[in-house]
Image (spheres, grey):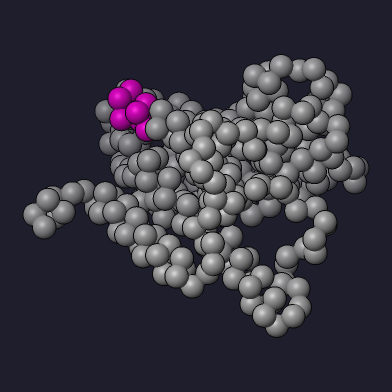
Amino acid sequence: MSALLSLRPERLRELSLFAVMAVAIFIFSLLIDNYIGGSFFNRVTTSVAITAVLAAGQTLVILTRNIDLSVGSIVGVTAYVTGEYLHSHPDLAPVLAVGYAVAIGAGMGLLNGVLVAYAKVPSIIVTLGTLAIYRTWLINHSDSRTITSDGLPDWVVELPNSTIVSFGEFDIRTVVAGAIVLIVVLQLMLGGLKWGRWVYAVGSNPDAARQAALPVERVLLGAFVASGALAGLAGFLFLSRFGTITVNAGNGLELQAVAAAVVGGVNIFGGAGTLVGSLILTAVAVDFLLGKRLGRISSRARGRPATGVPPPGQGAPSDA
């Protein structure tokens, strides 16, 4: 008990969330057949990878006492534009394709960062504005065209089902492992690099950070650029997972990213929290997917289609 009391508040929040998740999984495994099955596990973890990458970038911004509500639109733009480019250049090397998406996202994050750090416009106003601007640009640019998976390179389409290691029916997918490694590396950078300590200092007290001669504006700019770059990476993962991209791609992901970061223990007022805690965003994704799964079960019992669940053969991605 004394060991628990000695833990930092964010660690206690993380442990409590793990406990709640464990109890929820146990209860639902008793109520739903094959709830802890390989297919469901693989589908959930693949979905979580996109939100995890977004939450990592959102965490960096929130730690500086700001928020980035434009990431959903950035995902949409990068997914569409990258898919469009790959349609025209199917032989592009994978690392260059990913770099292309990340660079586009970083550029959009740079605009956010300049307006927040140097023009001193509140981040919620800036990113709400760019959320609409980026989405409007995508609508005009697309001219009602849809990116389809049949024109994408095979390696892009096959990436979501690429597996590093399997344990029976349970797969550790490449994108899931990559998201976990990314978050761990970013957390090590936050804790071990000077810039990481500056992020916490700026978020804890911006005025004190300025008096200590810390480069507050550069820290803010870096956080928004990193958030944009990670949203660009998430956009590439979105393209790979769904294949068919419309102008609505990424809608609502900004709220999932914020929720995942905060649920993971990041202080919404900045200065406290970890990226590793954001791995608990599994709870967010499970809540969404579980709702759909329970909806299907309930609807089958009543003999009619579940609301929001497309009939068989109408564009549902294959995650099994």
The single residue placed furthest to the front in the displayed view is 168
Residue extent of the magenta highlight: 187-193
**Which residue sits at x=58%, y=60%?**
289
Q: Is residue 306 visible?
A: yes
Residue 174 on the magenta span: no
Where is the N terminus found, in terms of image quarters?
bottom left
What x and y, as percent, mark residue 148? 84, 40
Quarter of the image where one finds residue 225: top right
The single residue placed furthest to the bottom in the displayed view is 302
What x and y, as percent, mark residue 100? 69, 23
Question: Quick check: 101 left or right of 154?
Answer: left
Quarter of the image where one finds residue 185: top left
Above or below 230: residue 9: below
**Which residue sits at x=32%, y=59%?**
19
Decide which of 162, 191 is in the foreground and name it: 162
What x and y, as percent, mark residue 135? 74, 46
Question: Quick check: 150 left or right of 238?
Answer: right
Quarter of the image where one finds residue 134: top right
**Which residue sits at x=63%, y=65%?**
292
What x and y, as percent, mark residue 305? 76, 73
Decide which of 191, 89 is in the foreground and name it: 89
**Which residue sits at x=86%, y=24%?**
88
Question: Quick check: 106 left or right of 35?
Answer: right
Above or below 199: residue 71: below
Q: Is residue 77 visible?
A: no
- How many discs appear? 0
**Magenta: main secondary structure:** helix
